[in-house]
Image (cartoon, rainbow, N blue to C red):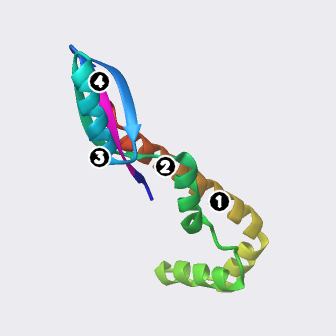
Amino acid sequence: MQEKVWVVTHIQGLEVTDANVFNSEADAANYAQEMAAVNTGSYQVTESVLNSREAIEEDSARWAVLPEFGTECMECIVQEVAEDAEEEFDEAACAKFFEEKKEELQKKADEMVHEYLRKELKDYINNERVILG
């Protein structure tokens, strides 16, 4: 879960010259008021979230684990493929092929899922970034 934070930005002219992050909205508002009283420029409080790559990876790990290929899994795949086939389909030969190639198929499936997750996490993190200024 992402932690909510408040960012106090110090703006002078057209530039953000400083930013401070608080875990309390009241603290951020108080800081902005205090700093505005003694400094030039304006102070703005913006609500945001604190992102952590480790937290995102830990959270995604629970749904990203792939099941091991086993006999039941192979039978389901063979049946699913066989249902869509219009011509004669040899389920036993297909099951034998999957059983012989299960390690290679598992490795390829893992690579595909990891690549997909890397892309999704990268896109997610890039979309959650807050650009100040």
Q: Residues within 10 Å of mark 4 (few under 14, many from 20)?
A: many
| Residue under the image location 45 percent in, 59 percent down | 1
Q: Nearer the viewer, residue 45 or 125?
A: 45
Which disc number belongs to residue 10? 4
Residue 7 covered by magenta stretch: yes
Count neighbours of disc 3 (C-alpha within 10 A) and say few if under 14, some if 14 to 19, many if 20 or more. few
Residues at badges 2 and 4 in contact (C-beta under 8 Å)?
no
Give the spatial CA distance, label 1 vs label 3: 46 Å
Disc 1 versus disc 3: nearer the observer: 3
Q: Quadrant of residue 95?
A: bottom right
At x 43%, y 54%, the residue is 2
Q: Nearer the viewer, mark 4 or mark 1?
A: 4
Reading the image, the residue beneath label 2 is 121
Up-down relation of residue 133 to residue 86 (above or below): above
Relative to residue 133, is residue 63 drawn left or right? right
C-alpha separation, residue under disc 2 versus residue under disc 4: 31 Å
**In the image, which disc is placed on residue 110?**
1
Going from N to C along the chain, the mark reached first, 4 or 1, is 4
Q: Which residues are magenta?
A: 4-10
| Cα–Cα gap, marks 3 and 2 | 32 Å
The first of marks 3 and 2 along the sequence is 3
Can residue 133 be seen?
A: no
Q: Nearer the viewer, residue 113 or 24?
A: 24
Residue 38 x %, y %: 26, 20
Q: Earlier in the sequence, mark 3 or mark 4?
A: 4
Tell me the residue that label 3 is attached to. 26
